[in-house]
Image: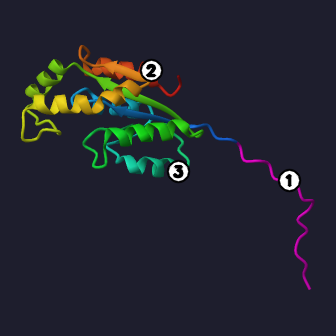
Amino acid sequence: MSHPADPGPQTDQEPAPQTAPIRLVLVTGPSGAGRSTAIHALEDLGYEAIANLPLRLVPLLLDGPPRPRPLALGVDPRNRDFSTAALLDLIDALAARGDVALTVLYLDCREDVLIRRFSETRRRHPLAPAESPEVGIRRELDLMARIRDRAELLIDTSDINPHQLRAECERWLAPDG
């Protein structure tokens, strides 16, 4: 007859090591201000970057498996569940979590520069597909005003080029500090 091996003396299990908070940057601001450039710059810095993630999916993403890299999430009014109130509620909920180190990056730009950028690219504004870009820009700036006020980091892209914006993102948000 065989006996199971003696497991030896029982020891208390060591507590699981505390993990560092998830570093999360929400990148937002009006269309044409440089969100895509900033998201790509953060991705190049080692962030896991996701553009246009629906707001309701952010908590699910954070509650998933551990994240070895910081996150950069592009958030803008094109998201299907976007509203100013919903984004402010999300910011409040994330700021209250002990496992998230949140930075809201708002890319700002003067209205005249946004109008010029849309006219140069001949793109329709996402909030005014059948109207002039000016209408969409004004609509979006009004929609985003309260979010701009809540941002920890504001970069005005009116007088900088994409290379300078990338350098600013690196200066303020490089994972190594």
Query: Image point 52% across, 50% down: which residue?
Result: 63
The mark closer to the camera, 1 or 3, is 3
- Quarter of the rendering containing residue 117: top left
Q: Residue 166 in the image: x percent, y percent?
A: 34, 23
Q: CA distance from mark 2 to mark 3?
A: 26 Å
The amino acid pointed to by label 2 is Trp
Main SS, magenta residues: loop
Q: Earlier in the sequence, mark 1 or mark 2?
A: 1
Query: Image point 37% across, 24% down: which residue?
Result: 149
Q: Secondary structure at mark 3?
A: loop
Q: Say which of 8 and 84 sits in front.
A: 84
Q: What range of the chain is rendered magenta? A: 1-17
77 part of magenta stretch: no
Disc 2 residue crowd, few under 14, some 14–19, many 20+, Cα 10 Å: few
Q: Is residue 61 visible?
A: yes
- Dot 3 corresponds to which residue? 63
Q: Secondary structure at mark 2?
A: helix
Residue 148 shown left or right of residue 110 in the figure: right
| Residue 81, placed above or below residue 172 | below
- Dot 2 corresponds to which residue? 172
Q: Residue 148 in the image: x percent, y percent?
A: 35, 26
Whether the residues at callouts 2 and 3 have beta carbons within 8 Å, the answer is no
The amino acid pointed to by label 3 is Asp
- Dot 1 corresponds to which residue? 12
Q: Secondary structure at mark 1?
A: loop
- Quarter of the rendering containing residue 39: top left
Residue 57 shown left or right of residue 114 in the figure: right
Q: Is residue 75 visible?
A: no
